[in-house]
Image (spheres, rainbow, N blue to C red):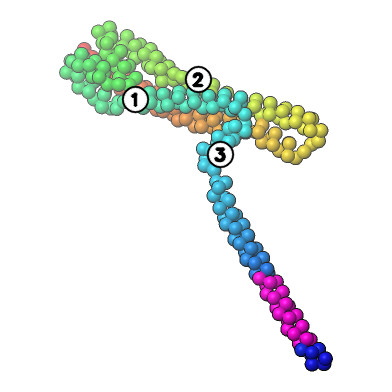
Amino acid sequence: MSILGVLTFANFNGVMAQTDQATDSAATVQTDTAAAATTIDEATAENTDVTTPADDTKTFHQMLKEKYIQGGAGWMTPVLICLIFGMALVIERILYLNMATTNVKRLLAGIEDNVKAGNVEGAKELCRNTRGPVASIFYQGLDRMDQGLENVEKAVTSYGGVQMARLENNLTWIGLFIALAPSFGFLGTVVGMVQAFDDIEVAGDISPTVVAGGMEVALLTTIFGLIVAIILQIFYNYILTKIESLVDQMEDGSISFMDILVKYHK
């Protein structure tokens, strides 16, 4: 019995030891599995964090479109129309003024050579073939050579005023769009603020989310209106500078033109 008991106890201890080892092995495997899962999750999270900014990156066009929609198409559309029509008039004026630029010294030299030789028709033909307001003014003066220098001077002065008015054509409309763009923006802001206060009243509480969202939408129209006005104002000042340069050419050229006629007039 003692021998059987010793043998039984030894077998029992061996079974228990094997069971404990199996339990420890299973626990170790579970722990390793959990650690591996955690590592995979962390790696996935890191990859997600790394790739998320790339997914959230938006182009300038997309951001502009999003802000346009947030500002409200009803108020952003008039601002956009001001930009489109204003830029159309600006481009038209810039092209016209660039085409109106004339090499006055070269033109005067050709007129002087023809008048000196008594070829008034040749001088007139030279003016007809030269583009720009200066050549048109000179042509009007040459066309009245037979009426005396006094009438020539009157014609040059009168037609100079006509050409100056043509140079300033459409500037009033550009100035109108410069004023309208921020005005529409401010109007949209006021309406948006009223709507924001209505949302606060409906919510029954001054929630920062409601206030911030409403104010952001309200101020977008003003931002876009001011941007449009700034763009148009820059081109408007450039056009004014170009007109002043052409007017100076017209005045200086007219004085030199009259000097030539006085010098060679018979």
State which quarter of the image contains the N terminus.
bottom right
The residue tagged with tag 3: helix, strand or loop?
helix
Image-quadrant location for residue 35: bottom right
Looking at the image, is 91 positioned above or below residue 7? above
Front residue (pair 199, 169): 199
Front residue (pair 125, 203): 203
Q: How many numbered tags mark residues here?
A: 3
Q: Is residue 31 magenta?
A: no
Image-quadrant location for residue 40: bottom right
Q: Which residue is mark 3?
A: 63
Query: Where's residue 14, x and y in %?
Result: 73, 84
Q: Is residue 24 magenta?
A: yes
- Magenta residues, start to end: 8-29
Q: Mark 3 against mark 2, which lies toward the viewer?
A: 3
Which residue type carries mark 1?
Met
Q: Which residue is mark 2?
A: 173
Q: Of the residues under marks 2 and 1, which one precedes in the sequence?
A: 1
State which quarter of the image contains the C terminus.
top left
Q: Which residue is mark 1?
A: 99
**Quick check: can you spot residue 24?**
no
